[in-house]
Amino acid sequence: MENFINSLPKPVLAFLAILIGIGVFMLVSPPHTVCDSQQTTFQELQKGNIFPTEIKKNKIPPTIVRAKEACQLGNSAGSCYEYFMVLKNVADGIGKASSECTTQLFNVTEVRSAMNDGIELMARLAWGIKPPEPGIERFGWMQEADIAIFCRLKNIYIRANGEEAWVNLRKKIYEKLPGEEVPPPTDPTQVAVEPRKATLMLNEQDIFNRSLFSVRCEAF
């Protein structure tokens, strides 16, 4: 092999060396795709929203961290407004990308976390502390604008992951919904009783009918 290489003319050796160099470079640094460009643009636009910003080498947490906490604590239209707007902004940003790039954008860690957490929290807030009755009660305090945001999240989730993944996510969230209301203990020294989950009290279809997941998103 060594003799064969030594027998090759120098121009051929140089050409082969260039080819090998290009091959190694391609392996180490894959070519920048259209989706990579769209991801870069998306992440720049979402800085401060779901990605941290940096000021004088100090990292500033994104808005979503504070907004989500305020929503969880307040559990009202006013306290959740900013959080819902962040989620809408993220979903709209993904929606503007090419359809073939949706999955790549969604699977960015911060994006996936924001979307999954947002869908779950909205479903849990609408559900409340006990199973709501089917009908308008299943929306809790949420108004049409809030439900429209939930539907937007659903649309982007399915576009990125498929219908089956949406069903699986829905079932996982079912397991976290309370199936009964447990009054707080009157004795401060008494340990609070954990309510049984909805999956132990209701069948899957009944949970669906009472949850935000049953909303007809075509209307929004």
Image (cartoon, grey):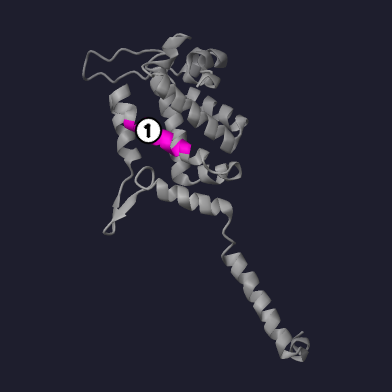
Which quadrant, please, contains the N terminus? bottom right
- Residue at x-position 46% and y-position 29%: 119
- Residue at x-position 44% and y-position 14%: 138
> x, y percentage for residue 16?
70, 80
- Residue at x-position 63% and y-position 72%: 22
Above/below status of 88 relative to 200: below
Along the viewing direction, whichever of 173 and 153 lies nearer the viewer: 153
- Residue at x-position 44% and y-position 39%: 90
Q: Main secondary structure of the magenta part?
A: helix
User: How many numbered dots are placed on residues in this image?
Assistant: 1
Above/below status of 12 relative to 183: below
Image quadrant where residue 163 sits: top right
Along the viewing direction, whichever of 138 and 186 lies nearer the viewer: 138
Q: Would residue 111 be visible to someone looking at this image? A: yes
Above/below status of 27 relative to 103: below
Q: Would residue 72 be visible to someone looking at this image? A: no
* 79 with respect to 214 (left or right): left
Q: Residue furthest left?
A: 188
Number of other residues with Cα within 10 Å of mark 1, as a class: few under 14, some 14 to 19, many 20 or more: some
> x, y percentage for residue 3?
77, 90
> x, y percentage for residue 94?
50, 40
Residue type at mark 1 is Met
Task: Magenta stretch: give its range.
Answer: 82-92
Asked if residue 168 lies in the magenta stretch, the reply is no
Image quadrant where residue 32 sits: bottom right
> x, y percentage for residue 93?
47, 41
* 145 with respect to 17 (left or right): left
Along the viewing direction, whichever of 52 and 208 lies nearer the viewer: 52
SS under mark 1: helix
Asked if residue 88 lies in the magenta stretch, the reply is yes
- What residue did someone put label 1 on? 85
Along the viewing direction, whichever of 91 and 202 lies nearer the viewer: 91
